[in-house]
Amino acid sequence: MSRSAFTDWIVEITGKKPLTPNLYTRAATHGSHGDKDYQRLEFLGDRVLGLVIADHLYREFPKEPEGQLSQRLNGLVSGHVCGQVAKDIGVGDHILLGKQARDDGARQSMKVLGDVMESLIGAVYLDHGMDAARSFILLHWKSRITQPVDDIRHPKSALQEWAASNNRKVPEYELIEKSGPHHDLKFTVRVSVNKIGEVQATASAIQAAETEAAKKFLEKFT
């Protein structure tokens, strides 16, 4: 894809013309493509995302207690939601990948998509400031923020609460398999609740696999 097409896409998703184009190129560069990848921008974007969402929830839901606000926050800033937002805006078409990563399907990896989404937030913050970063985040997260808290509650929290309310021990998570190339590892996790049952799930990160396993457990047993 040409540089001009990439710039047009950045303008489309951010509503602003890049002042420092190289920031966005770096935000879309996977580690398999070169040394200057998105990881530092991802680190920054993750923190900006958390602050913006927390601030917005505090103002949007003035009557909700801290516990419910935390549930909303944990769900909205999760890697899974970041990956979903990234898919919605076409991030996968613009990631710069090495050949092996392309062959291994990194362009469709929810882990990679979520990471790039956070790095783009970091790039917008550095390029245009906090107000622009806030507008960018709220534009693409808005429909999710207004969902009922039960719909965005983190599955692991929901499962733990369910186990406690049914007088069961805390759910146990166990990593049972790790496979794939180093840049696109797959982790399979098993979650079990004593005297209820167990399920397995696979994802590109241990935390994501645990989350998916908890979600499957809730769908199967509750």
Image (cartoon, rainbow, N blue to C red):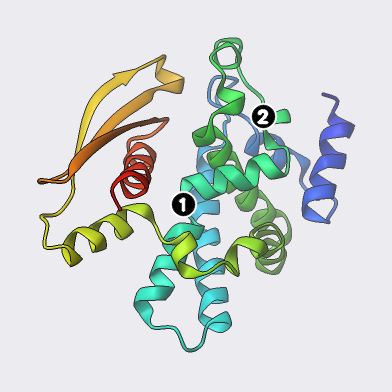
| Mark 1, secondary structure of its residue | loop
Of residues 208 and 21, the one drawn nearer to the viewer in this rendering:
208
The reply to whether residue 119 is in sight is no
Q: Which mark is residue 95?
A: 2
Outermost residue on the bottom side: it is: 63
Which of the 4 quarters of the picture holds residue 191? Answer: top left
Q: Which mark, by number, is residue 78? A: 1
Q: In the rendered structure, which amino acid carries the disc numbered 1? A: Ser
* 67 with respect to 141 (left or right): left
Judging depth in this view, the residue of 206 and 48 nearest the camera is 206
Tell me what residue is drawn at x 82 percent, y 41 percent. 9
Residue at 10% in and 45% down: 195
Residue 13 seen in this snapshot: yes
Residue 187: x %, y % from top left: 33, 27
User: Where does the image place residue 61, in percent across and percent down from the top left?
Assistant: 53, 82
Q: Position of residue 150 (x, y in %)?
A: 44, 65
Residue 220: give x, y in percent of width and height.
33, 44
- Assign a secondary structure to mark 2: loop
User: Image height check: is 206 above or below 79?
Assistant: above
- Cα gap from disc 2 to disc 1, whole angstroms: 20 Å
- Neighbor class of circle 1 (other Cα within 10 Å; few <14, some 14-19, many 20+) is some
Which circle's residue, 2 or 1, is located before the other in the chain?
Answer: 1
Tell us which disc is closer to us: 2 or 1: 1
Amino acid type, callout 2: Ile
The correct choice, above or below, for 219 with respect to 76 in the image is above
